[in-house]
Amino acid sequence: MSVIRTRLRAVRRSARLGFLGAVLGMTAFIALPATPASASLSQCASGYICVWNATGYTDGPGSFAGSNQNWSLFSHSTCPSGTWNNCASSIYNHGSSGLGVNVYVDIDYATGSLCVPQGAGASDLSVWQYTNGANANNSISSNFWTSTCHS
Amino acid sequence: MASGCDARTPTASRHPPTQRNAAATASRTADIVRLLQTDSRTLHDDWVLFNAQQRAVAACMRRHGFSYAVNSGGDEPAPGIATAETRATTSPASYGVAADASAFLPAARSRTGNAAVTAQDAYVRSLTPQDAAAYAMALDGPVNTMAPIILPSGRRLSYETRGCLAEARAEIFGSVRDALLDALLPGDVQNSFFATLGRDDGYRHAVDLWRGCMRRAGHPAKTPAAVIGALKQLLAGGTPPAVIAAREQAAAAADMSCDARSRLRALQRRLLVAYSRRLPAAVRDALAAVADRRRTALAAVNS
């Protein structure tokens, strides 16, 4: 599998997070070229959680490594905000460490989460809700890996 | 047996059928409530199962000629720690968040100290594309062999059915699907329950009491879950575990006191018991099956 790594254009408009946040973003994210016509789970490299702008794993993926407290640091040109914040419509946990990934409706893992176990994917987040009842489509803002979503 | 008693005959059989049915229903409800309420025992069981799964995955990967860096899943959860739904029963009180830090190996941290990437994920990401593809094939199987699952809330997802991860799940839970149900079904029903809490006047009043108490104690938070979330935020941001431990002990102590005054968690449990009794039969059956399989898996792992 050929994974083409492109240079991340860190979005620096989040001034309150400043340089540290931007560096964290650069260490935690790779942007892959959007190829909707051939989009599939196979584009998600092992070791990452991947998200797509559209349902059915199309228009992406954005590939996240590690826990990330503000997805507005990660750019994606076809998202309304130009970043992955509040943009994902499908998701796949292709981590390798056994951990599940909690995704949150707010930045900073503040409120409302849902867990995606390793090796599982949701092609349509519009039928998913967070713990606070909010709809998960176009609303993920942070992610945190956890062993309590164990399977 | 020397006494002549039949060991297969349960004591309850001496009671009329209606009493036996009531006892069975109560026992089943208790199992379901325990599954739907995360307490320190749940966290410990999760930790045991996670580690068993890690060992099984590592053994499988070795058989395929690959190495696998076992993730500890953090330190063993201590008995009596507080959760969002249950009070601490030991002193000093804590939520066990700082103990999670060891799930993330320092060697895998970024230069900014972001405690986030496991050694295993870092290893896989360091492989060449060809090696990574072979590794992923052994661990996850081909992506076109995923199976669907639909939860009571309508949530749909697909899961990998082949590879070492699937093999390990099946080994522990009986099937890959059962492993996914163990991870997802309780949370799915919990979410539906949580959605009902905001409509309960008594619950809202208890939350207000708890919030006021926590604010006066110097630990303002909307809910116990928010307290734990804030601590996890510190952990993910690279705050030293010792600092987190001190903060969480202070917050958990205040939480314990405020929970006693507001009776927030006791009320939530009563509401959960009532909610679980109102669940559709099919959902209760599914939850009871998850509880049974979890019990069996834990017995096998602990034997």
Image: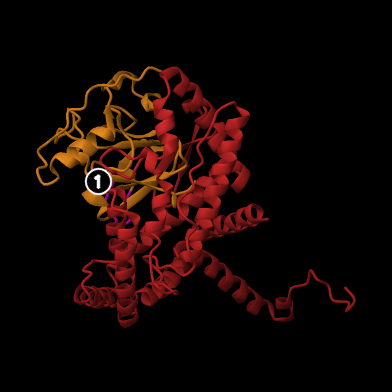
Chain colours: A orange, B red
Q: Is residue A132 magenta?
A: yes
For the magenta stretch, what is the residue range? A129-136
Instruction: Return the residue at label 1.
Output: A69
Q: Tell me where residue A83 appears, x and y as whole percent.
A: 18, 35
Question: Which corner quadrant of the image does residue A145 belong to?
Answer: top left
Looking at the picture, tell me which residue is in the foreground, B66 or B201. Answer: B66
Secondary structure at numbered mark 1: loop
Q: Tell me where residue A92 appears, x and y as whole percent.
A: 38, 35
Looking at the picture, tell me which residue is in the foreground, B143 or B126. Answer: B126
For badge 1, the amino acid type reads: Gln
- Compared with residue A51, is residue B13 higher up or lower down, i.e. above or below? below
Residue B200 lies left or right of residue B15; in this view the side is: left
Q: Residues within 10 Å of mark 1 (few under 14, many from 20)?
A: many
Question: Which corner quadrant of the image does residue B116 belong to?
Answer: top left
Q: Quadrant of the C terminus of chain B?
A: bottom right
- Compared with residue B212, is residue B84 higher up or lower down, i.e. above or below? above
Q: Residue at x 25, y 55 (%)?
A: A110
Q: Tell me where residue A55 appears, x and y as whole percent.
A: 31, 33
Residue A88 lies left or right of residue A2; in this view the side is: left
- Compared with residue A83, is residue B286 higher up or lower down, i.e. above or below? below
Residue A87: tell me if it is visible: no
Q: Quadrant of the N terminus of chain B?
A: bottom right
Question: Which corner quadrant of the image does residue A45 belong to?
Answer: top left
Residue A92 lies left or right of residue B208; in this view the side is: right
Q: Residue at x 27, y 51 (%)?
A: A109
Q: Is residue B301 magenta?
A: no
